[in-house]
Amino acid sequence: MSGHNKWSTIKRKKGAIDAKRSKIFSKLSKEITIAVKDGGGHDPDYNAKLRIAIQNAKGVNMPKDNIERAIKKGDQDGANFSASSFEGYAPHGIAVFVECLSDNNNRTVSNVRAIFNKYNGTLGTNGSLSFLFDRKGVFEFEKPTSIGFEDLELELIDAGAEEIEVDENNVTVTCALEDFGNLNKKFEELKIEPSSAELERIPNDTKVLPVNEAKSVLKLIELLEDDDDVQKVFHNLEMTDELEAEMD
């Protein structure tokens, strides 16, 4: 099992255990609202960004009413949100990259800084961690029965897939940033609906820590993820089997 797939697996398990459903729905609603504003309208057939946002919402069983409400808010509230990112280090040298969507940047800056300070982290300047992460497209879906898997792999590789990993019935496909749109179209052609289709920051290398130190880092990460303005948190902490056992 490769490092990324293991990281994805732990992320899914952790999400199932820790994440508050209302928080997840709130963040996805914000992404849908922004997609309506930035992507060109309410119709997902003509708005690829909105189509992907809805797809991700369905992947976590977000109710249809919530999705429709977020779409309707697009024209009214979409302009109120702005994107920002923060880069820094958690304790023990773990790199952390935070992506936010907020209607009050001063509040976001203050909250993120306070969380880093509380857990002995340090914020850096934007761009200071760019060499530690690669921007990748990551798709997850259930292994289909409608097409032979070898044929599916060839189709996806032709569309730009760099890595295809299978964990039981779950398939994770990773691609370069520039191939994200091509792969998304390929899934549509194959009539496969991923449970998740996102742009992620994948660490070039991960760092192993003793479990007690790793758990202190995860506290910082969890607090960031729980903030309403934070959409995604990426880090280069190695999720070892020992650490996974502690999270179960």
Image (cartoon, rainbow, N blue to C red):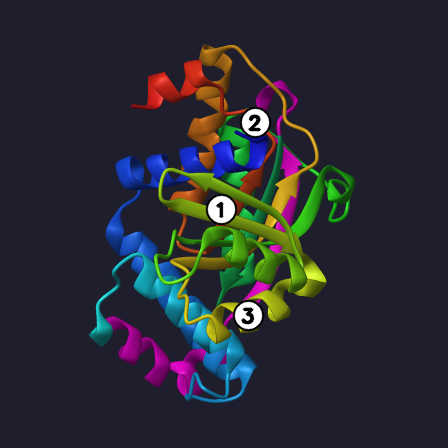
Looking at the image, is mark 3 or mark 1 earlier in the sequence? 1
Looking at the image, is mark 2 or mark 1 earlier in the sequence? 1
Q: CA distance from mark 3 to mark 1?
A: 40 Å
Residue 235 appears in which quarter of the rendering?
top right
Magenta-highlighted residues:
66-94
From the viewer's perspective, is the residue at label 2 or at label 3 nearer? 3
Q: Nearer the viewer, residue 133 or 1?
A: 1
Residue type at mark 1?
Answer: Asn
Which label is found at residue 186? 3
Q: Position of residue 83 (x, y in %)?
A: 58, 64
Is disc 2 in contact with disc 1, using a CB cutoff of under 8 Å? no
- Which residue shows up at 50% across the image and 26% down it? 119
Which label is found at residue 237? 2
Can you say whether 226 is above or below 49 in the image?
above
Q: Which residue is mark 1?
A: 111
Residue type at mark 2?
Answer: Leu
